[in-house]
Image: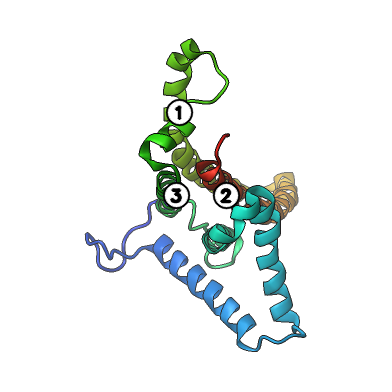
Amino acid sequence: MAEFFPAAFAFEGTVFEMNRIILVRIISAAVLVALFMLAARRASLVPGRGQNIAELALDFVRVNIAEETMGHNARRFLPMLTTIFFAVLAGNITGVVPLLNIASTSLIGMPLVLALWVYVMYLAVGVKKFGLGGYLKNSLLPPGLPPVLYVLVTPIEALQVFVFRPLTLALRLTANMIAGHLILVLCFSATNFFLFEASGVMKAFSALSLTAGIAFTLFEVLVALLQAYIFTLLSAVYLNMAVEEEH
């Protein structure tokens, strides 16, 4: 667990404090920007391999997340959703990158900042479109209910809109990446123990724990993709709910 609270190696005690996870975030962001710059540098009508991969990735966010979830509202929020998807993906995938070995989203700061961005945006666009009163009415008073039920439903809706949405966005992502890191640590620590410290027939268990570690590493790649997709999809859903007349 100490790996999630690394010691500072520069600017300790300041807002610019640097530790291992912050360094991993900087590296993942720099690599992400560099990859897209390389893909776009020689953009052409007949795309090369790098441009084709970048376009497929961008189209995945545009078509499978933004357009399918938001319809005619997709274009408005596409830059934001694309940024969120690739930021989360880059932060997740570092958990299986050699020498980095930890997801930069496994510390809640980054997921919380992204969740707050979504939170502020869906409140802002909802109030801008409907006005404060209209937005609160759309969000807290679901149509079609008997008036007496609003006494029960409205507080629940208020908690959902103003507390649970941003909180669950951040916590879901962080918890999944923490769990994945701990599983990998357990598998490879067991391999090290069985191979170098155990004796006799116990050494054979190193093959089992190593196989499990490799399998969970591949699974973590899938989880990294899935969590980026879920975070972005829910962000799109919340933004769309804020600007739709009824939901």
- Name the mark on residue 125: 3
Which of marks 3 and 2 precedes in the sequence?
3
- Image check: 191 left or right of 135? right
- Of marks 3 and 1, which one's residue comes earlier in the chain? 3
Give the residue drawn at x 72%, y 46%: 205
Tag 1 residue: 140
Which image quarter: residue 8?
bottom left
Q: Can residue 158 be seen in this view?
A: yes
- Nearest the camera: 197 or 181? 181
State the residue at coordinates (52%, 45%): 243
Q: Label 2 sits on what residue type?
A: Ala
Quarter of the rendering containing residue 154: top left
Distance in Å between CA atoms under marks 2 and 1: 19 Å
- Asked whether the residues under the numbered discs 2 and 1 touch, taking CB atoms below 8 Å apart as contact, a structural biologist would say no
The furthest residue to the top:
148
What crowding class fits label 2: few (fewer than 14 Cα within 10 Å), some (14-19), or many (20 or more)?
many
Q: Is residue 138 left or right of residue 58?
A: left
> Mark 3: few, some, or many residues within 10 Å (few <14, many ≥20)?
some
Disc 1 crowd rating (10 Å Cα; few below 14, some 14-19, many 20+) is some
State whether residue 112 is above or below residue 102: above
Q: Distance between the residues labelled 3 and 1?
A: 16 Å
Depth check, front residue: 155 or 38: 155
Residue on which the image places disc 2: 236
Residue 24 to residue 109: above or below: below
| Label placed on residue 67 | none
Q: Which amino acid does label 1 sit on?
A: Leu
Measuring from the top left, give residue 217's x and y in whole percent.
Answer: 67, 55
Residue 81 appears in the picture as rendered: no
What is the x, y in percent for residue 129?
Answer: 45, 47
